[in-house]
Amino acid sequence: MVEKKIRLGVIGCGVIGKQHIKAALGVDWIELAGIADANPDTARLAAEQFGAQRVYPNADLLLEDPSIEAVVLAIPTSTRNALALKALANGKHVLLEKPVALHENEIHQLIEAQGELTVAVCSSRFRFLEHAEAARKWIDEGNLGEVRLLRCRVNEPAGKRPATPPPTWRLHTAINGGGIVANWGIYDFDYLLGLTGWTLQPKWILSHMWQLPEPIADYFPPNSDSETYGSAFIQCDNDAVITFERGEFMAAPLERSWQIIGSKGSLTLHMTWPSEKTISCTTLDAESGAQTRTLWEGTEDSSWIDKGPVIDFTRSIIEGGKPATGLREALVLQRILDAAYQSSRSGAPVMINSEGD
């Protein structure tokens, strides 16, 4: 029996905003107290569909309502920081969609404004899946040893010409902060760094990024300027490295793999879909060598990708704990992204900032 209920407001009623609303409705300690959207008609229709207690004509009025305790900001990266700062100034806990910021300075502003309030980031969503808990437990038991390599390689092949153009923000740097590296790479880095307990401190990065290939360059609007393919090598300060490759609309077959390799063992993972998956672990034995077995297999409840961040966020508020990814972890992720884009532009390795940790 939950005595306290969190009165939650959701700002942004697009695709991802509606997922947050659905998640909130399924939790008995959350009241969907209000919603708002840049388009008032969109907010009104969402309220009718989901039964929100109140519709606000704009985000500012929702944030100024003292009855709202916490807010989800499911809005573009370019407009999120200003509303997050206003939410914190009005004493509200904040759940931020990803990418959390356009650059590192925005996260410093949020850290300075946070005080005792809870701020969580949705880049953690794939760590709420069942296999991730099994992987985390295996690592916590010491089976990995010292971390040596985190690896992500995901390439999504191009499909046939879309019937309607993808949303502009997908490849518009000023709106989203970047393309596939910002939009999905932040999940990959959160997943791998989070499973290893945020113990790695990235030092420098060498990266390169490419835009849409010429045969399908007209899939997006002419002003699209972000990458659809990125690759990076990251050296960390404790003799570990991260290798990263992410692409969409690729002239290549489908590849999806994540690995964590240590001095004593390794994990072969599958962060995303399909929900039916097998996670394997390998341990090193002095006599028999490397031995691989299945660590976890089954069909996961993929709804945790959507409901996990909302449940984790509101539980952290009620219990006074830390969310899976807070602003300090988001700062690490943003520094990786900022340095990756800088390295790609310059064609040279870039040191990753660690000041002010």
Image (cartoon, grey):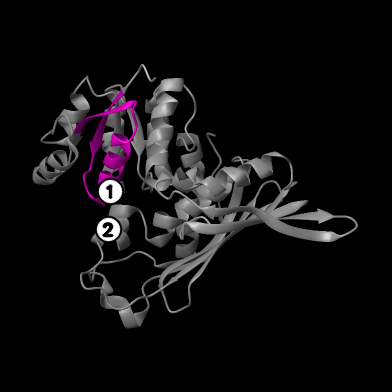
Q: Quadrant of the N terminus?
A: top left
Q: Position of residue 231 (x, y in %)?
A: 52, 65
The disc, 2 or 1, on the residue closer to the chain's N-terminal end is 1
At x 35%, y 76%, the residue is: 159
Q: Secondary structure at mark 2?
A: helix
The residue pinned by badge 2 equals: 169
Q: Position of residue 314 (x, y in %)?
A: 38, 29
Residue 184 lies in quadrant? bottom left
Does residue 298 appear anywhere in the picture?
yes
At x 33%, y 28%, the residue is: 28
Q: Secondary structure at mark 1?
A: loop
26 is within the stretch colored magenta: yes
Give the residues drawn in magenta, as a range. 6-34
At x 35%, y 18%, the residue is: 4
**Who is closer to the viewer here, 140 or 83?**
140
Residue 244 lies in quadrant? bottom right
| Tag 1: amino acid | Pro
**Who is closer to the viewer here, 154 or 109?**
154
Residue furthest out toward the top = 3
At x 43%, y 34%, the residue is: 312
Q: Position of residue 130 (x, y in %)?
A: 53, 46
The residue pinned by badge 1 equals: 76
131 is within the stretch colored magenta: no
Q: Quadrant of the C terminus?
A: top right
Residue furthest out toward the bottom = 215
Labelled pair 2, 1 in contact (Cβ < 8 Å): yes
| Tag 2: amino acid | Trp
